[in-house]
Image (cartoon, rainbow, N blue to C red):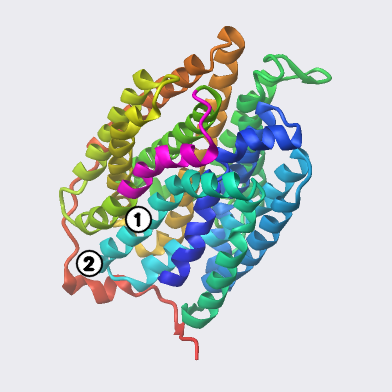
Amino acid sequence: MYALCIGFFMTLLDTTIVNVALPSMITDLGATLNDVIWVVSAYLLAFAVPLLLTGRLGDRFGPKRLYGIGLVLFLGASLACGLATSADALIAARVFQGLGAAAMTPQTMAFITHLFPPDKRGAALGMWGSVAGLATVSGPLLGGVLVTHLGWEWIFFVNLPIGVLALVLLFLWVPDLRPNRAPRFDVLGVVLCCLGLGLLVFGIQNGEHYRWGRVAGPITVAEIIAAGVLFLALFVLWQASARNPEPLMPLRIFRNRNFSLGNVANVAIGITVTGVFVPLALFLQTVPKLSPLMTGLVTAPASLMSGVVAIFAGRLSNRADAKYLPITGFALMALGIGAMTFLLGDGSQWVLLPSMIALGIGMGLVFSPLTNISTRTLDRSLLGAGSGIYNTSRQFGNVLGSAATAAVLQIVLAATGDFTAAVRAAFYLLLAVTAVGIAAAFAFRRVAAPSVTDSPRASDPGLPVTRPS
């Protein structure tokens, strides 16, 4: 578990560690605001799109093997990111970094669901959720230290020693789960999903850049967004088609009410986390003109509280009334974001401290309980698909959060020239998203806590385990 969490921490760290480096990248690479937002979005998009496929690849070739391949690709791309001398080169390297992360992430949940019985899965998910929460919001602090003292390149170079350690521990400690069947691959589904997500995110994020008009020749932003929606609709129809022998996203899984609602809430938490920290990091270095290190320190309380709370929240998530954990979490996140909206200014930024604490506690109460509630009642035959879909919904939320807040920032900034007003507008959007998360969590069906007597049968994944010698 520790070996997997090291690599998992690294992949999620790179979703936010770049945030405090964005102003430095604009200066050093001669980039625009839209360029550096794409440094964030390219990673998130390449991370999100293949997740449904990489979960199945893990089922076919073994999760340990896929995790190792993804880790090597991630490390090579991290080196390329640090050596990049232009925004275009950096964005391209971030795409490959995202692909490596996509290969790794589903395998961590696969190991948890296969190796831990239901009555112990809450504790394991608590640790997993703690790592997720800590990595997602500790990026700005670590990034601030590295950018201030070494330069923005080191937010990528730091991955190399961490990744090498994760690779060594992977081969020494992680068991080798061998699949007992070779699933077929939904190639058309992958193509439709990639095209849909790619076009939708490109259109939303670059709309203001092209003044919501023509992009190339007769093609407009509206047509690109419409094409993205169309491809996603075709993807859903193909997943439901009887002609599809093994869909990436078997729609029957959504008959499980808690899983369906959990994915709605999962998208909401993804949008909120990315949507808060990207504009906040830009604001702190643009308006009050804090250093990258001070920017990281201002956001550090959220990192600390999220990591600590997630451990205990995961253990409590086995209770029948566990839905009140994410309900409370989303409410605290809304409280923190709402307070920040009115406290933003060019004075002392330590007035944001209570808001950051509330935000961090809220995130800790959402991450691991949401995962356990969503997947606890899934049929064992759907655990692999469920893991891929659940991870995809979180990353899809991250991508939408990055694209939507970038669009709001650029629209309001173009209209008013006031960066503070632009960030506030982005935060208003996030308050609406947290309301969706609260509503989804309220609608969870009450499920009896798993019993110890059920664990041996429920934990059997049907996969022989080969221990490393």
Name the residue located 35 percent from the left edge and 31 percent from the top edge. 350
Residue drawn at (76%, 32%), measured in percent from left and top?
30
Residue 108 seen from this side: yes
Q: Nearer the viewer, residue 115 or 35?
A: 35
In magenta stretch: residue 322: no
In the depicted view, which residue is nearer to us: 128 or 214? 128
Residue span colored magenta: 288-305
Which residue in the structure is indicated by mark 1?
130
Give the quadrant of residue 312: bottom left
Q: Earlier in the sequence, mark 1 or mark 2?
A: 2
The picture places residue 411, in percent across and down from the top left corner, at 58, 15
Q: Secondary structure under badge 2?
A: helix
In this image, 292 relative to 114: left or right? right
User: What amino acid is found at the position of numbered circle 2 in the picture?
Assistant: Asp
- Neighbor class of circle 2 (other Cα within 10 Å; few <14, some 14-19, many 20+) is many
Q: Position of residue 128 (x, y in %)?
A: 37, 59
Cα–Cα span, label 1 and label 2: 18 Å
Report the front residue among 371 and 5. 5
Left or right, residue 358 beside residue 293? left
Secondary structure under the numbered disc 1 in the rendered image: helix
Q: Is residue 211 above or below residue 448?
A: above
Q: Which secondary structure is most common in the magenta stretch? A: helix
Which amino acid type is shown beneath numbered disc 1?
A: Ser
Which residue is denoted by mark 2 in the rendering?
Answer: 119
In this orientation, does residue 62 appear? no
| Residue under the point 42% across and 55% down | 386
Q: Quadrant of residue 68?
A: bottom right
Q: Does residue 195 appear to the left or right of 168 in the view shown?
A: right
- Which residue corresponds to the image point at 51% horizontal and 31% vertical from the top-left? 290
The count of marks equals: 2
